[in-house]
Amino acid sequence: MAKKKKINLTIDDTPISVDEGTTIMRAAEKLGIDIPRLCYHPELSLAGSCRVCIVDVKGMGYFMTACSVAVWEGMEVQTNSPEIRQARRDIVELLLDNHPQDCQTCERDGRCELQNLAYSMGVRTRLFEGRRKEFPIEATSHSVVRNPEKCILCGRCVRVCAEIQGVYNLSQHGRGFNTVVGPAHLGNMDDSVCIQCGQCINACPTAALLEKPSTDAVWRALADPELHVVVQTAPSIRAAIGEGFDMPPGTPATGRMITALRRLGFDAVFDTNFGADLTIVEEAHEFLTRLKEGPLPMITSCSPGWISFMERFYPELIPHASTCRSPMSMLSVLSKTYYAEKLGLDASKIFTVAVMPCVAKKYEAARPEHADVLERPYTDAVLTTRELIWMIKCYGISLATLPEGEFDAPLGLSSGAGDIFGSTGGVMEATLRAASKLITGKPGYRVEFTEVRAVEGLRELYVAVGPQNIHVGVANGLQNAKTLLDKVVRGEEEFHVIEVMACPGGCIGGGGQPYPPPGVEILDPDLLRKRAEALYAIDHDKKLRESYDNPAISELYDTYLDEPGSAKAHKLLHTHYAPKLPRGIR
């Protein structure tokens, strides 16, 4: 690789040498200088739209944006002066004066980038009065709520939807004072090509985009003495929930989370990892059948954002998607069938709550495919990690100081294979663990498949499983997934199995995960890595590491489901998909 040319410049009278093409902002960071920004995000293209990052470059005669201007030889930059600070402050004041005055009741209070910027710049009064933009809240979606009045037109949601997810659902409409961000023709989100992933929520610096709240419904259920309220928690929750209580990223908090849920009043606390183990058993059986009969590749179906994407953009691949329900849906079904019968409970009196890292799970829970014959949803409410953090705080519970609790039987025992579902490559690795046992007939033949752990976004490789050489693909972030899917559609590659996770890093980077502290980006690869490491550490420390070794799964089949792939298993644990909208732009 050719060595990059070095550029010499000074920033705030301090000499520095950086690679050619480095922006002023990145160069300043090497000197420990944090230039304020709003529209900038390191994982997205450069927009330079908010102008908050302006700096003074000698000889230019005007302020330049540090996020989008590359350095040049001999450049002299000043990042701070009375004039620069006043100009930045004026920009922020103008944004605030066209912004709702409801910080104390806003969902992002304390985690709002605009609020934090105003504080750091010393904005204490609103100087400009006049007409403020007025737009209605669009809350018809199952997952995402748009509040255009809080939009600062930074464009981060537009770019993450296009560049990371490849969906291109959002764009700016109108001009000047009437500019607004929304789907095509400013239609409802559920009527658009929105896949409900919630990455626009994560990218938004304010509260212009939020998840559809479910906390009120859960509070009501917990207060109803007639209801038996059960909760299940996804694997990635335990690796991220501590961040909401100032615990270091990547701190496993499984036991303390369970105790907190009991104190909130849930009657039973189950582990979605049990559903993940069950998914693997059914999926491995399905995969071996497809190896003999087709169609291949088999594509995993645990990510609801990916399923929505497939139904809208790749309907020809629907026959390749595993028919297995997601772990959340499997466990919800069992809560109202197997569990209800085992305890002699009326299924109509069971209220199932799922705590998920993903706002698309709210959409999944509302799909008619995941309802019983009386059209009652198996999953009654879905809380994001953020919503659960708020509920725990609302109850005055200090998560960090809680004793360790344990999940309830029979749907609380899981293997380490279930834990790693939360990270990209985890579903693939768990499937390969199960497939290796079935193919070789040797339990524990191979437990770890580290080569499929792919946080970087995309990986293609062959994996030896006994005599079989399995061609696998792993993708997270749907723009990456397109690379694999287009090869399949064009017949350029013959994969055996493909794992697709809609969100960057997998579920650990889901649209409902905690907002990071100031100074840490929501898609920061280091943050995602720490969350993933927590899940792999939990897996490594468990005695049970393969789904087929879970005795609770064996009992379920022995007493209720007969065997993997049975007629009853298909009725309860499998589903179907169909094209949703005309194909969009790829």
Image: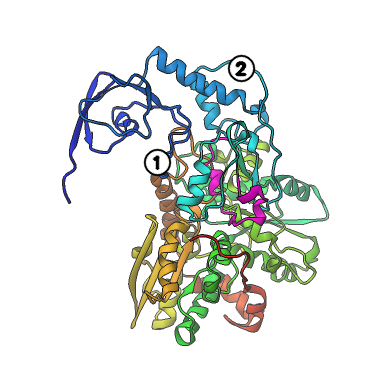
Secondary structure, mark 1, is: loop
> Residue 238 magenta-drawn?
no
Q: Pick whichever, 130 or 365, lies toward us.
A: 130
Secondary structure, mark 2, is: loop
Q: Which residue is mark 1?
A: 42
Find the residue positioned furthest to the front: 175
Q: Which residue is mark 2?
A: 128
Q: Pick whichever, 533 or 53, lies toward us.
A: 53
Colour mode of the rendering: rainbow
Q: Pick whichever, 180 or 426, lies toward us.
A: 180
The residue at 34%/26% (across/down) is: 33
Residue 79 vertical placement versus 363 (above, below): above
Residue 363 vertical placement versus 94 (above, below): below
Question: Looking at the image, can residue 419 be seen?
Answer: yes
Whole-percent x, y for residue 280 in the image: 51, 71
Which amino acid type is shown beneath numbered disc 2? Phe
Q: Pick whichever, 523 or 316, lies toward us.
A: 316
The image quadrant of residue 153 is top right
Q: Residues within 10 Å of mark 2 (few under 14, many from 20)?
A: few
Which amino acid type is shown beneath numbered disc 1? Pro
> Residue 186 magenta-drawn?
yes
Distance from label 1 to label 2 (Cα)? 32 Å
The residue at 47%/58% (across/down) is: 478
